[in-house]
Image (cartoon, helix red, strand yellow):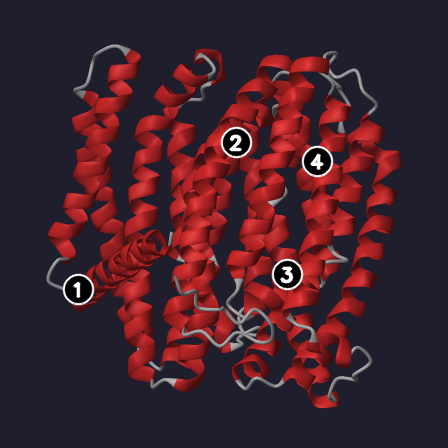
Amino acid sequence: MKFKKEITKGLNTDSRTKNALKNISSGVGSQIIYTLLGFISRTIFIKYLGVEYLGINGLFSSILSVLSFAELGMGSAFVYSLYKPLAEKDEASVASILNLFRKAYTVIGITVLVLGSAVIPFLDQIISDKPEVITESIYVIYGIFLFNSASSYFFSYKVSLLNADQRNYITTINYLIFYVLQNTIQILVLILYKDYLYYLLVQLVCLFLSNITISIIVNKKYPFLLNYDKNIIDLKVKKEIFSNAKATLVIKVGGILVNSTDNLIINHFSGLASIGLLSNYYLLLGIPAALISQVFNSVSAGIANVNAIESKEKQYEVFSMLNLANFWIYGFSAITFVMLSKDFIKLWIGDSYTLPLSIAIMLAINFFMVGLQKTIWNFKSTYGFFHEGKYFVVGTAILNLGFSFALGHYYGLFGILLATALARLLTNFWYDPYIVFKLGLKVNPLVYLQKLLMYSLVITIAGFVTYYTCSLIEFEPIINLILKAVICLIVPNSIVILFYRNTGEFKKVKQLFLESSKAILRKGKSKTNNF
């Protein structure tokens, strides 16, 4: 038996395709485990603690997401600054950027801790009507959430290096190990003690150990970092990083206000129980979102490489292929969510935990709108377009807040979700594609608009046909769920294939899928032979 010794130290030398395959396979595989374990953990959580505790989980997570504006957009700016020295294998420049990154994130972690502590005196006002089932001190609960959030910043720069160097799989595997450990212990804690504070403390310890472990791994993978631990970053690069960070700060704040304030507004209009019910639907939506993100995050560094060295024609070819795959997967997932979510939750935890179909549709629309932007955002960030369109995100946030209070007052939860979709549609949903096509790909933005309208039409047709077909199903709940799942698998995908089977990007997606499948099978066969 001969084993090929893998080079484990130093900068990544593998090809874009090999990196993408490793990142995608580890990401998708781990996400399956996350999903199964997440459902088991959530089921036991609801059984032993109740929906109100889910609500307080969601509320405190939203508060700390708002406080994460202290990150100042540094993450994207630093990762972008790493692409060039990583491609050139410039160890000294990589180390100098990481040194600055470490100092900046130390300040950010302390800032989040201070700002988060300043919220503590106002917790009674934020949760003015605390449910009787929650017997623990909300101050202690919030303190644990705050420590988890703030402490992670002290390790973020090392995770960013792995991701920029196309080694996401290392972070994925590390997180998976501690996620399994955390959930296993938490399940035991809930069954044996039914104690929410013990539950949170387990999460705190496991997250901290996970961060420590990834720090040790990076030190071993990149030993040259210690040789340049006092290296000072080039002044020009430093100015560029902070210039980009200032631009992304505006985008960051706007994004936080759009994505993290809904739970605060829902709590105002409907209370913690509604947040808890909604969190189960978000859990279901999180499954395809996480799987897709694993795939697209795994290729983002590869996209940066394409944009750096390939022609505009090649860049547009890659964009078109990813954009079609993006639309297809998100569209299929959105339709499946609408058709199956209520039936699944009814079977899973009971009919009392379900929400109206209109809520599922609005959640799916928001999910699909964000999904359609994924390829755009990948290209926008890897082109380094941090300044362009930054104020549009602020416009999205302002419109979202205004629409949410107005529509939430009249239409409740449905109105708040509708407000988010309207705010996105009127601002960055059209402007970000304009920037990428006009300044990056050098293609007329109307080309994207035509594709977007066609995507929307195709997925609407697929949705109506699927809904009508599923409405004919009237059997026992478990039979209904299985039959509807089969319909969702066949109908939307068949309609997409019917419309796009003769296009160049469809053929590229098909070719890439077949090549990736063969590569994974060859890799699996090789491993089997080695044994």
Which numbered disc flags the more N-terminal residue, 2 or 1?
2
For marks 2 and 1, give the one nearer the viewer. 2
The amino acid type of the residue labelled 3 equals Val
Q: For mark 2, give the secondary structure.
A: helix
Compared to 531, does 11 lie above or below?
below
Query: In the drawing, does residue 495 fall left or right of residue 157?
Result: left
How far across and how far down the image is residue 459, in percent? 25, 46
| Residue under label 2 | 38
Q: Which sits in the foreground, 434 or 93?
A: 93
Residue at 37 percent across and 69 percent down: it is 17
Q: Is residue 63 visible?
A: yes
| Residue under label 1 | 507
Which numbered disc flags the more N-terminal residue, 2 or 4?
2
Query: In the drawing, does residue 312 fall left or right of residue 135?
Result: left
Q: Are marks 1 and 3 in contact (CB under 8 Å)?
A: no
| Residue under label 4 | 203
